[in-house]
Image (tube, grey):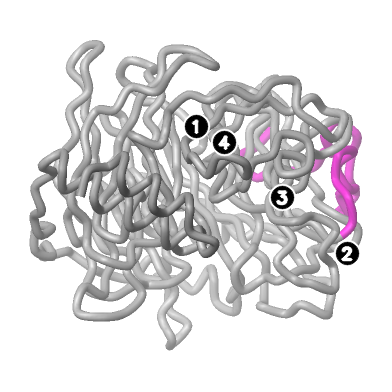
Amino acid sequence: MPITSCWMRERLSSRFRYDSIRRCAAALLLAAGVAAALPALAQTSTCGTMDPTGVLAGVAGDFELTVDPDDPAGNVLFVSNIQPDFFQYQNVVVAQIDATTGQTVPGSLTVVANNFKGNSSRNGPEWVRTPQGQLGAIYTSADGVHGVFRAAPPVSWNGFLYDYVGNPTLGSPPVLPSSLPGFYDGLPPKPPQKAATIPMYAPVPTMNTCTNACYGYYNAGQSTDVTSVLQGQYGLWVGGVTQAPWDSYLYVAACTQRTRICGIYQAQIDGQGGFASVQSIATADYTLSSGSGLLQMAAEVHPVNGVPVLFTGETPRLISVWTQSAPGAPLTLLTRVAAPPGAVHYRAYVSDTQVVLNFFVRNGPALGQYTLPVSANGSSLTVGKVTQIYANSLQGSEIQWYRGAQSWAVSFRGQDGIYRRCWFTP
């Protein structure tokens, strides 16, 4: 069926929703001749304990990893809340992981905050770096998103002692100025070296002051409720959102309420609860919703040439890879690649030479964790193959590049409470 016929038929239907978009997406992709291919088989990984001396014993929250940007050795930092407990205040802790062995450094566990409170089994602390160079962690509490930061340069690797303006926290970091009650922190800013905005979510209805995703400056202003503002002021149904590599800019997947045409937009928050600009950067011919109600999206900056890379999951079996030359410029489609059905939880990571998409399949015959690498040769980008790195979804796991080992690893906390890491090649 021609694409125009599909759109006309679906637009006339009173039941036009994301399933309509999905049907037209499938027709478009078949017409474009996108080849289906199975992901590469799971690789043999070298797995072992991440915590041989029990540094993280008793730490059972939602953890995140990042390479310490101020450490010449490239050691990795761990941050987490202590327990998945929504009703009680609890500590936020950090630890150091050796860049060569991928194992925790004995005696490195350090408490940096005492007022975490939130849906901590899935929305723990997140790493962030301010434009001034301070590395910090943002996390949820009863009154909004809080942040604790090191100095720049830091006095020590675990010197997370200051709030967003440099005042000592004395163990209880304050709420960030732009935050509102009920917000949860979500994905970290992209890229963490430059971004000034923080995403915040409110998945619990009783605390829902944010419709879906809210973004605000870490140090001033008022957060923008993306879904509410775009629907009310711009006539757009939001299907997904992630942060662009330029401060205050977002990538938004949305459909117009009037014409039912979908695409990707670039929106810039204004720090006052709204948007300074909203521009269409890819039309429905290039990106469509998956039918799940939320489009899977993730973005990062390529470490070789500084080019932004955006991943979108357009149908249950396809991933599109895009790039962009400047804020507001049209997206350029690099390629579409086949993926296993049910791919969710897109996250983008960087090594010294690659941007790597990480995602999960939670159930079914394709159950597992997967990667999709993007390499660079000068200004040109090359998209690799989807590879299964672990034959389990490993909810709560993190992948990280270890500079000393010159290898990727996936780290997770097993049901036995033991942290493990497995080396792999995307």
Q: Which badge, 2 or 3, comes first in the chain's sequence? A: 2
Q: Quadrant of residue 108?
A: bottom right
- Across and down, in percent, residue 110 comes to 67, 57
Q: How far apart are marks 2 and 3 (CA)?
A: 13 Å
Reading the image, the residue beneath label 1 is: 71
Residue at horizontal 33 percent and vertical 67 percent from the top: 342
Identify the residue at image location x=47%, y=50%: 11
Membership of 170 in magenta stretch: yes
Q: Amino acid under label 3?
A: Met
Q: Is the magenta stretch mostly helix, strand or loop?
A: loop
Of label 3 and label 1, which has the lower sequence position? 1
For label 1, count other residues whose C-alpha is less than 10 Å away and answer few (under 14), some (14-19) or many (20+).
Answer: few
Magenta span of residues:
155-181
Q: How many residues crowd around disc 4 within 10 Å: few (fewer than 14), some, or many (20 or more)?
A: many
Amino acid at pointer 2: Ala
Q: What element carries label 4?
A: strand
